[in-house]
Amino acid sequence: MNLRSKTLIVIAVSFLTFIPTIYFFSEKILITGAEKLEKEEAYNEMERITGILYDEIYSLDETNYDWAAWDDTYEFIKNHNKDYIESNLVNSTFKALDINVILYFNSTGDLVYGKAFDIQNESVAEVPQEILNYIREHPFLIYHKSTDSNVSGIAVINGKAVLLASRPILTSNDEGPIRGALIMIRYFNERQLEEISKLSMVPLHLHILSGEIEKEKFVKILDKNCLAVFKVLKDINGKPAIMIEGRLKRDIYRHEESIINYFIFSLIFIAILTLFITFLLIEKTVTSRIVKLNKELNKIAESGDITKRIKEGGGDEIGELQKSINSMLDSIQKSRRKIEELLEKEKRMRAMVAHYFFNPIAIAKGYLQLYLESNKNEEVERALKAIDRIERVVKDIINGKWEIQ
């Protein structure tokens, strides 16, 4: 594998590692932030919805106040006149005020008058006994200690939620003595919940609570498109009574998800572009110069001409390497010159050795041979053999064949 391929692989692996890492942390941060934001928005939306419900309770209490602090009501508790009933407590009144039950109690706690009306069926109904029992169990709804006393809120009676308001019966000038209590009740069912849903433009569901609950508000993710937000509302006793559930679209989450997708596509595009540019820069500044340097060195090696030099350029590490190679070639060239000089000296020395050794040996050998021709002598023959050996040794030294053992 060549240097270009290795460089491309290293850069590609680096970016392939970098992109998932950035994606993971970006998604973690953005999605976590989106979930936190949408949870806050869900709570705010639920506060707005419960605000509409509390406006209903406030409106019921204001209506109750108008009727309870009224001279005609004040007199009705005393004389029980039928004109009051026929003039005020007709079916159209219940329908107009959206009231299901109205109860008049005197100061001793006796029920003076009570009427229930089914608004959906537009028919009169008996006052449910469970409502009367609930009121008896909560005497503060009947017995008001001061003229500015009032009780309003939510109650769960026999597993059903109602909105109720209780006011002391006074004169039109808000004066007493208090002659009793006027209690108005509005059933809080799916019809009322649907009306609040229309006002808030949020689908709502009602849950009746039978005991304590751990959290008063919380959010539950249903899927990528929808979440449910829950809010617990307390009754007139301050205990958890009902829980409102609202279904909200996860617009913030989908928006953040689209941002993440856009971000990732942009990141991939930028990464590819950066990969290409990085590869080109490395190719121009490093790889191509190293490849060129390698080619020049191969040419010098193939030619054997150490007088050639590498072309130098750049003030970086590669430039320094080129200088070092040229310095090395200079050193090799100098060493080669020295070797050639030493070889020349050796050649001259061998010539001198041949001249100084062979002439005396030849003379000595010639004389000994002449002597042997006329006189046979064993010692002379031995001397000639020794001279021959010396001659061979000298020839070997001159020819470079003799080595020290």
Image (tube, rainbow, N blue to C red):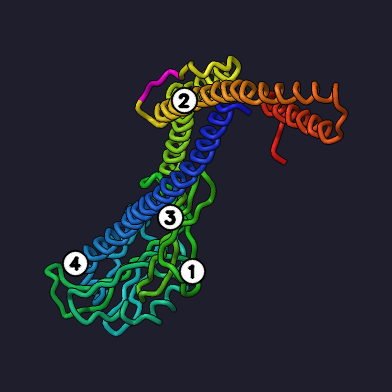
Q: Which mark is first along the chain, 1 or 3?
A: 3
Of 44 and 61, the residue lying toward us: 44
| Quadrant containing the N terminus in the rendered view | top right
User: Which residue is disc 1 drawn over?
Assistant: 209
Q: Which mark is residue 119?
A: 3
**Residue positioned most to the front:** 374
- Residue range corresponding to the magenta coloring: 310-314
Depth check, mark 3 against mark 2: the one in front is 2
Q: Is residue 30 left or right of residue 183?
A: right
Where does label 2 land, which residue? 334
Q: Residue at x 43, y 18 (%)?
A: 311
Q: Where is mark 4, residue-wise?
A: 70
* Residue type highlighted by circle 4: Trp
Is any atom of residue 278 visible in this view? no
In depth, the one of 245 and 119 nearer the eye is 245
Of mark 1 and mark 4, the one earlier in the sequence is: 4
Q: Is residue 23 above or below residue 78?
A: above
For marks 4 and 2, the one nearer the N-term is 4
Q: Is residue 402 depicted above or below 373 in this figure?
A: below
Q: Label 2 sits on what residue type?
A: Lys
- Give the spatial CA distance, label 4 vs label 2: 127 Å
Residue 66 location in percent, x, y?
21, 63
**Inter-mark Cα distance, 3 to 1:** 25 Å
Q: Quadrant of residue 391?
A: top right
Q: Up-down: is 94 above or below 285?
A: below
